[in-house]
Image (tube, rainbow, N blue to C red):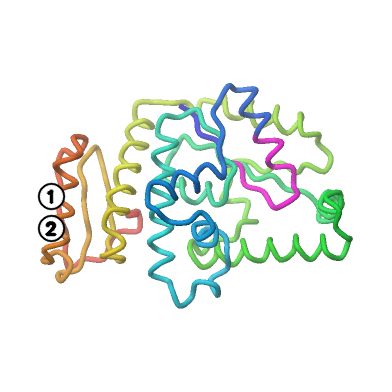
Amino acid sequence: MSIITISRGSSSLGKAVAEKVAAKLGYDIFSRDLLFKTSGRFHVPQKTLEKAIHDAPGIFERYSHTKKVYLAYIRATLTEMVSRGNIVYYGLAGHLLLNKLSNVLKVRITANLEGRVKRKMAEGLSEQKARAMILADDDQRKKWSRKIYNADPNDSSLYDMAVCIDKLSVENAVDCICRCASRKAFESTSDCIRQSKDLSLACNVKASLVESFPDVGVICEYGNLLVYATQKEAHAAKFKKILLDIKKENYDIYNLEVHTGLAAPANAV
């Protein structure tokens, strides 16, 4: 049930690598499909979701609550999509959105700027325009990661492996990634399956609550759901009704507890 996330800058051949890795391993692959499914499920335009997961904070600064809602929707959909395993995801922020799962192989594809500019120019752009677009995109991604996760996408500690595509061919990179994915550290185990189900359940409960209660935190361990809320939220009729409906409709929940007056732990979604 391995899961592979491939992070890359624009024009770094990450898509080509991801597609060949999926083909070689026989895995399903998706990227923009995530936004399509999230859009259909939560009735939010795809372009709005794309801005929420890509644009630098300034675009959404006055709408931080709205951004929090959209990110919760995206993460709920993503964790559900990968819960069956054998997936390659090469969309934005996969290494961060799935960082709580132990069987995820997080890969970063890097390439030098000059090579990226040449690939962008092949689309019919001038060198100046191509360079400006790549640098602007890199800047947006960096600001987003720092604002939401306090992380720099170029920080190698966020990944299990980084592959520089400049000297290696796409096939070389694919071979390295596939060999790594077969290692014992990324094997599917009963504990990995349980982790994946728990994370998906926590994220989906968060998505059900976040629009009305943006500061709620959720943890799921072995099907035991812990919801962290303020006193005011916990006593709201709407809050109680949402939780009651969730418990009735989801047989994977063994127990549901609401904790008030406490900050949500760092591992809460």
Which residue sits at x=26%, y=45%?
220
244 to the left or right of 148: left
> Does the rendering let one see residue 185?
no
Q: How many marks?
A: 2
Asked if residue 260 is among those painted magenta in the image, a careful observer would answer: no
Q: Separation of disc 2 and disc 1 at Cα? A: 6 Å
- Please state, as top left, top right, bottom left or bottom right, where the N terminus lies in the image: top left
Which residue sits at x=49%, y=57%?
49
Residue at image mark 2: 240
Which residue sits at x=71%, y=36%?
16
14 to the left or right of 2: right
157 to the left or right of 173: left
- Please state, as top left, top right, bottom left or bottom right, where the C terminus lies in the image: bottom left
Residue at image mark 1: 244
Read off the magenta span.
6-18
State the SS at label 2: helix
Q: Position of residue 15 (x, y in %)?
A: 68, 40
Q: In front here: 243 or 223?
A: 243
Q: In front here: 266 or 173?
A: 173
Q: Position of residue 57 (x, y in %)?
A: 53, 71
Asked if residue 9 is among those painted magenta in the image, a careful observer would answer: yes
